[in-house]
Protein backbone atom coordinates (compact mmCIF):
# COMPACT_ATOMS: atom_id res chain seq x y z
CA UNK A 1 0.00 0.00 0.00
CA UNK A 2 1.43 3.43 -0.90
CA UNK A 3 2.22 5.98 1.80
CA UNK A 4 0.01 9.04 2.20
CA UNK A 5 2.55 11.30 0.49
CA UNK A 6 2.36 9.11 -2.61
CA UNK A 7 -1.44 8.97 -2.33
CA UNK A 8 -1.53 12.78 -2.29
CA UNK A 9 0.86 13.16 -5.19
CA UNK A 10 -1.03 10.67 -7.34
CA UNK A 11 -4.36 12.31 -6.53
CA UNK A 12 -2.88 15.74 -7.20
CA UNK A 13 -1.80 14.59 -10.67
CA UNK A 14 -5.23 13.11 -11.40
CA UNK A 15 -6.88 16.38 -10.40
CA UNK A 16 -4.43 18.94 -11.79
CA UNK A 17 -2.63 17.03 -14.51
CA UNK A 18 1.12 16.82 -14.70
CA UNK A 19 3.64 19.58 -15.14
CA UNK A 20 3.93 22.99 -13.56
CA UNK A 21 1.44 24.95 -15.65
CA UNK A 22 -2.30 25.03 -15.02
CA UNK A 23 -4.00 22.41 -17.16
CA UNK A 24 -7.61 22.70 -18.35
CA UNK A 25 -8.50 20.17 -15.64
CA UNK A 26 -6.77 22.30 -13.01
CA UNK A 27 -8.53 25.46 -14.18
CA UNK A 28 -11.91 23.70 -14.01
CA UNK A 29 -11.02 22.39 -10.54
CA UNK A 30 -10.40 25.88 -9.15
CA UNK A 31 -13.61 27.26 -10.66
CA UNK A 32 -15.61 24.40 -9.13
CA UNK A 33 -13.84 24.90 -5.82
CA UNK A 34 -15.32 28.38 -5.58
CA UNK A 35 -18.80 27.07 -6.36
CA UNK A 36 -18.36 24.64 -3.47
CA UNK A 37 -16.68 27.15 -1.15
CA UNK A 38 -19.29 29.88 -1.63
CA UNK A 39 -21.99 27.34 -0.82
CA UNK A 40 -20.45 26.48 2.58
CA UNK A 41 -21.78 29.48 4.49
CA UNK A 42 -23.26 32.94 4.24
CA UNK A 43 -20.08 34.34 5.82
CA UNK A 44 -17.98 32.94 2.98
CA UNK A 45 -20.39 34.21 0.34
CA UNK A 46 -20.34 37.65 1.99
CA UNK A 47 -16.52 37.83 1.83
CA UNK A 48 -16.71 37.37 -1.93
CA UNK A 49 -19.84 39.43 -2.63
CA UNK A 50 -18.13 42.16 -4.68
CA UNK A 51 -15.23 40.06 -5.96
CA UNK A 52 -14.21 39.53 -9.56
CA UNK A 53 -14.35 35.74 -9.39
CA UNK A 54 -12.25 35.15 -12.51
CA UNK A 55 -9.45 37.17 -10.94
CA UNK A 56 -10.04 35.36 -7.64
CA UNK A 57 -9.68 31.96 -9.33
CA UNK A 58 -6.35 33.08 -10.80
CA UNK A 59 -5.17 34.26 -7.38
CA UNK A 60 -6.26 30.99 -5.79
CA UNK A 61 -4.29 28.99 -8.34
CA UNK A 62 -1.12 30.88 -7.44
CA UNK A 63 -1.65 30.74 -3.67
CA UNK A 64 -2.67 27.09 -3.77
CA UNK A 65 0.65 26.17 -5.32
CA UNK A 66 2.34 28.05 -2.47
CA UNK A 67 0.55 25.73 -0.02
CA UNK A 68 1.69 22.71 -2.00
CA UNK A 69 5.20 24.15 -2.06
CA UNK A 70 5.17 24.29 1.74
CA UNK A 71 4.21 20.61 1.76
CA UNK A 72 7.10 19.79 -0.57
CA UNK A 73 9.72 21.99 1.11
CA UNK A 74 8.62 21.69 4.77
CA UNK A 75 8.78 25.46 5.20
CA UNK A 76 6.76 28.43 3.99
CA UNK A 77 7.92 30.57 1.12
CA UNK A 78 8.04 34.34 1.53
CA UNK A 79 5.14 34.46 -0.95
CA UNK A 80 3.02 32.26 1.31
CA UNK A 81 3.86 34.39 4.34
CA UNK A 82 2.79 37.45 2.33
CA UNK A 83 -0.49 35.77 1.41
CA UNK A 84 -1.03 34.93 5.08
CA UNK A 85 -0.42 38.55 6.10
CA UNK A 86 -2.86 39.73 3.40
CA UNK A 87 -5.53 37.41 4.83
CA UNK A 88 -4.87 38.41 8.46
CA UNK A 89 -7.16 40.47 10.64
CA UNK A 90 -5.33 43.61 9.50
CA UNK A 91 -5.75 42.60 5.86
CA UNK A 92 -8.81 40.88 4.39
CA UNK A 93 -9.88 39.70 7.89
CA UNK A 94 -10.32 36.03 6.97
CA UNK A 95 -11.23 34.42 10.29
CA UNK A 96 -9.39 31.18 11.12
CA UNK A 97 -12.63 29.15 11.20
CA UNK A 98 -13.16 29.91 7.51
CA UNK A 99 -10.09 27.83 6.65
CA UNK A 100 -11.91 24.75 7.92
CA UNK A 101 -14.72 25.51 5.47
CA UNK A 102 -12.07 26.12 2.81
CA UNK A 103 -10.61 22.66 3.42
CA UNK A 104 -14.04 21.02 3.39
CA UNK A 105 -14.85 22.69 0.05
CA UNK A 106 -11.46 21.69 -1.31
CA UNK A 107 -12.03 18.04 -0.40
CA UNK A 108 -15.51 18.12 -1.89
CA UNK A 109 -13.94 19.40 -5.10
CA UNK A 110 -11.18 16.79 -5.03
CA UNK A 111 -13.86 14.13 -4.68
CA UNK A 112 -15.64 15.52 -7.77
CA UNK A 113 -12.45 15.56 -9.87
CA UNK A 114 -10.50 12.53 -8.65
CA UNK A 115 -11.82 9.19 -9.90
CA UNK A 116 -9.66 7.47 -7.26
CA UNK A 117 -11.06 9.47 -4.34
CA UNK A 118 -11.40 7.56 -1.08
CA UNK A 119 -10.76 8.09 2.64
CA UNK A 120 -6.98 7.81 2.19
CA UNK A 121 -7.02 10.44 -0.56
CA UNK A 122 -9.04 12.79 1.66
CA UNK A 123 -6.63 12.27 4.55
CA UNK A 124 -3.60 12.76 2.32
CA UNK A 125 -4.88 16.14 1.10
CA UNK A 126 -5.67 17.24 4.66
CA UNK A 127 -2.20 16.26 5.88
CA UNK A 128 -0.39 17.76 2.89
CA UNK A 129 -2.10 21.15 3.23
CA UNK A 130 -2.36 21.24 7.04
CA UNK A 131 0.95 23.08 7.59
CA UNK A 132 0.01 25.83 5.12
CA UNK A 133 -3.49 26.17 6.57
CA UNK A 134 -1.99 26.33 10.08
CA UNK A 135 0.30 29.13 8.89
CA UNK A 136 -2.65 31.06 7.48
CA UNK A 137 -4.52 30.70 10.78
CA UNK A 138 -1.44 31.70 12.77
CA UNK A 139 -0.92 34.93 10.83
CA UNK A 140 -4.52 36.03 11.46
CA UNK A 141 -3.60 37.69 14.77
CA UNK A 142 -0.04 38.73 14.00
Image (cartoon, rainbow, N blue to C red):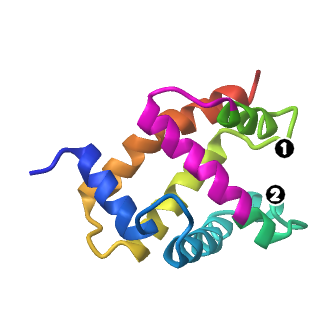
For residue 47, the mark is 2
Decide if residue 9 is on the left or right side of residue 15.
left
**Between marks 2 and 1, how big is the CA–CA gap?**
9 Å
Q: Give the residue at the far top of this rendering.
A: 142
Decide if residue 87 is on the left or right side of residue 24.
right
Residue 90 image-quadrant placement: top right
Q: In this view, does 124 lie above or below 108?
A: above
Q: Residues within 10 Å of mark 2 (few under 14, many from 20)?
A: few
Of the numbered discs 2 and 1, the one sitting upstream in the chain is 2
Residue 133 image-quadrant placement: top right
Q: In this view, does 142 lie above or below 29?
A: above
Tag 2 secondary structure: helix
96 and 34: which is toward the camera: 34
Tag 1 secondary structure: loop
The answer to the question of whether label 2 and label 1 lie on touching residues, with beta carbons closer than 8 A, is yes
For residue 92, the mark is 1
The percent position of residue 71, horizontal first and vertical second, equals 44, 38
20 and 1: which is toward the camera: 20
Magenta region, main secondary structure? helix
Q: Which residue is drawn at 66% across and 38% down?
A: 96
The percent position of residue 134, horizontal first and vertical second, equals 55, 32
Amino acid sequence: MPGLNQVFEESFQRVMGSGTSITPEGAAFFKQFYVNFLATSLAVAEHFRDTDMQQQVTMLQKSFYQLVSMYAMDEPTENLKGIARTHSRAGHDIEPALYDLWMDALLRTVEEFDSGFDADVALSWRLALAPGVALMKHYYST
